[in-house]
Amino acid sequence: MPSKVLQPPGRVLLHLTAATVLCSASAALVGGMTYRIATLAGAVLSAGNPFEFFVEHIVVFAFVSGVLAGWVNNWKFPHISARWVRLIPTVLLALQVLSWHDYSVFENSWRAIGSHFFGDSCRPPYSLAQLASGGAYCFDQLKFTAPFCSSLGYAAGALAEQSFHKEPRIEGAS
């Protein structure tokens, strides 16, 4: 049985890696495919390219990929850590939010922070000059928001899988 292969420390690392790195990467793939399908279907999108479309909807794509991965991985490798993988990305995002001060003195700081990390202030550059100047471009949504949202989805998927599991099992045990 595959679940006996990974002992508890290995399962914790598996769930943490799957919830952050793999879910964020798969969210980008799903975002790109969704963009291609929408454009082929004739939908009029505000985004001009797949990356911009992904960044505009990063919260949704990261959460959905996290739910699916959390369900599947916890079904295959059940462990209580699958529900707690959200702690590290949450702490990292909170530290980044508390230390971020790149907003104008004339705007509400919480509105600027919300827009920067969860809103539409992060856009891909339209030219190399814009990329070099750093204008209207940030990676904080990719570095902090996507792993945070995917780990929340992962924990929700793991919890949903545990609640729908028919046979009683001991958490953390093989």
Image (cartoon, rainbow, N blue to C red):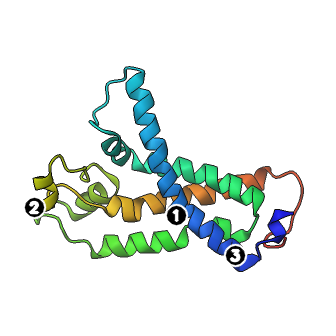
Residue 96 image offset from top left, x and y in percent: 34, 72
The numbered disc on residue 59 is none
Query: Foreground: 68 or 26?
Result: 26
Give the secondary structure at mark 2.
loop
Quadrant containing the C terminus is bottom right
Q: Counting residues from the N terminus, which is met first, the one under dot 1 or under dot 3?
A: 3
User: Tag 3: residue type?
Assistant: Gly
Q: Counting residues from the N terminus, which is met first, the one under dot 3 or under dot 2?
A: 3
User: Tag 2: residue type?
Assistant: Phe
> Whole-Å distance between the Cαs marked 2 and 1?
35 Å
Query: Foreground: 36 or 67?
Result: 36
Identify the residue at horizontal 69%, vertical 58% (top origin): 73
Give the image quarter of residue 81.
bottom right
> Whole-Å distance between the Cαs marked 3 and 2?
49 Å
Give the secondary structure at mark 1.
helix
Identify the residue at horizontal 30%, vertical 61% (top origin): 139
Determine which residue is flagged by label 3: 10
Determine which residue is flagged by label 2: 106
In this picture, is 112 found above or below 37? below
Q: Are marks 3 and 2 in contact (CB under 8 Å)?
A: no
Give the secondary structure at mark 3.
helix
Identify the residue at horizontal 76%, vertical 56% (top origin): 75
Give the image quarter of residue 106.
bottom left
Residue 153 image offset from top left, x and y in percent: 56, 55
In this picture, is 91 found above or below 61? below
In this picture, is 88 found above or below 23? below
Q: Nearer the viewer, mark 3 or mark 2?
A: 3
Q: Residue furthest front?
A: 128
| Mark 1 neighbour density, 10 Å: few (under 14) some (14–19) many (20 or more) | many
